[in-house]
């Protein structure tokens, strides 16, 4: 639920949602939404949720650098 910045009405359903990954090491995912207020008929954007991402190990390159052949 998001609160309209003009009239203060609580709006439940977003028209559109999208996620953004932020942070120095890209460890936080924030979900935003565009809402339409039923009372004043204005569109506004608001943050819906925020969740930390798991720290996943990077895959090792294949072949390993010491096995690379140079021709």
Image (cartoon, rainbow, N blue to C red):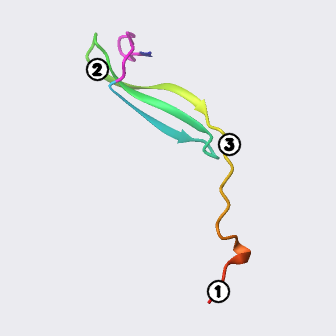
Using the image, tell me which numbered label, if any, was put on residue 42.
2
Q: CA distance from mark 3 to mark 2?
A: 39 Å
Q: Residues within 10 Å of mark 1 (few under 14, many from 20)?
A: few
Residue reaching furthest to the left: 41
Is 28 colored magenta in this rendering? Answer: no
Q: Mark 1 or mark 2, which has the lower sequence index?
A: 2
Q: Nearer the viewer, mark 3 or mark 1?
A: 1
Q: Nearer the viewer, mark 3 or mark 2?
A: 3
Is 13 colored magenta in this rendering? Answer: yes
Q: Main secondary structure of the magenta part?
A: loop
Q: Residues within 10 Å of mark 3 (few under 14, many from 20)?
A: few
Q: Secondary structure at mark 1?
A: loop
Judge by depth and name the residue closer to the eye, 59 or 26. 59
- Give the residue at mark 3: 55
Q: CA distance from mark 1 to mark 2?
A: 63 Å
Across and down, in percent, residue 70 comes to: 64, 86
Q: Secondary structure at mark 3?
A: loop
Q: Taking 66 as reference, is 54 above or below it?
A: above
12 sits left or right of 54 in the view: left
**Residue displayed at 60% across by 44% down:** 26
Q: Are marks 3 and 1 in contact (CB under 8 Å)?
A: no
**Residue displayed at 40% across by 28% down:** 33
Magenta residues span 3-14
Q: CA distance from mark 3 to mark 1?
A: 35 Å
- Give the residue at mark 1: 70
Judge by depth and name the residue closer to the eye, 47 or 52. 52
Q: Mark 3 or mark 1, which has the lower sequence index?
A: 3
Q: Are marks 3 and 2 in contact (CB under 8 Å)?
A: no
């Amino acid at each position: 639920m998001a609160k309209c910045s003009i009239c203060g009405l609580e709006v439940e359903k977003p028209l559109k949602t999208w996620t953004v990954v932020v942070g120095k090491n890209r460890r936080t995912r924030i979900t935003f939404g565009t809402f339409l207020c039923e009372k004043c008929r204005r569109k506004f954007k608001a943050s819906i949720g925020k969740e930390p991402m798991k720290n996943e190990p990077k895959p090792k390159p294949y072949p390993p650098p010491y096995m690379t052949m140079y021709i």
